[in-house]
Amino acid sequence: MSAINQFNKDFNALSSYLRGFALKLTRDRNYAEDLFQETALNAYQHQKKNRFKEHSNLKAWLSTIMKNTFINQYRKKKRRNQLEETPSYNNIINTVEMTTYNEGESKINVEEIITLIDQLDENYRTPFLMAYQGYQYDEIQLALGEVPLGTIKSRIHHARETLKNKIKALYN
């Protein structure tokens, strides 16, 4: 039997375990199925590149791929502010007593901040906005082409510092 056929057979034998593991990680049937599919895709891609060695623990290897995929997707959602955490009713009641008024909104005009961002040089504005939207540094690097990763990090830092100084000067 060829290595690919054996891999398919072994993967199929572990599919119910992997679906259960995905459900344990996500606690959502639809998301668990998506995670299972993503794991299967990653496993087959890695297997084609001979990253899985025969006679190793396939179950552990697939579990690691799934766990890492789950963690990476969680981090990406968190960075992009898409993680929806609904506080319970009791938490809302308990936090109302500790709430204070935030004067920041009344002091800072959003349109002025957008104007400040628009005034940034294009080389700084684009990576800053992409980072603000939750893109990872390597995703920004791919979008910008041949710009080194260190340069992207430096530009984002420079843009933040410039904006911080301009906001301080505007509102101090």
Image (cartoon, rainbow, N blue to C red):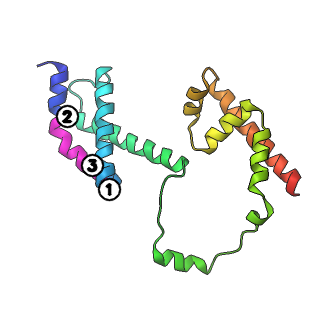
- At x 76%, y 52%, the residue is 111
For label 2, the crowd category at 10 Å Cα-Cα, with few meaning under 14, some 14 to 19 and many 20 or more, is some
Question: Which residue is tagged 2?
Answer: 11
For label 3, the crowd category at 10 Å Cα-Cα, with few meaning under 14, some 14 to 19 and many 20 or more, is some
What secondary structure is marked by label 3? helix
- At x 24%, y 47%, the residue is 19
Residue 52 on image: x %, y %: 28, 26
**Foreground disc of the pair 1, 3:** 1
Residue 48 on image: x %, y %: 29, 21
**As drawn, is 166 to the left or to the right of 62?**
right
Question: Which residue is tagged 1?
Answer: 28
Q: Which mark is residue 21?
A: 3
**As drawn, is 100 to the left or to the right of 137?**
right
* First in sequence: mark 1 vs mark 3: 3
For label 1, the crowd category at 10 Å Cα-Cα, with few meaning under 14, some 14 to 19 and many 20 or more, is few
Against 83, is 152 above or below? above
At label 1, the amino acid type is Asp
Identify the image quadrant of residue 105: bottom right
Residue 9 on image: x %, y %: 14, 31
* First in sequence: mark 2 vs mark 3: 2
Asked if the magenta segment contains residue 23, the reply would be yes
Magenta segment, which residues? 12-24
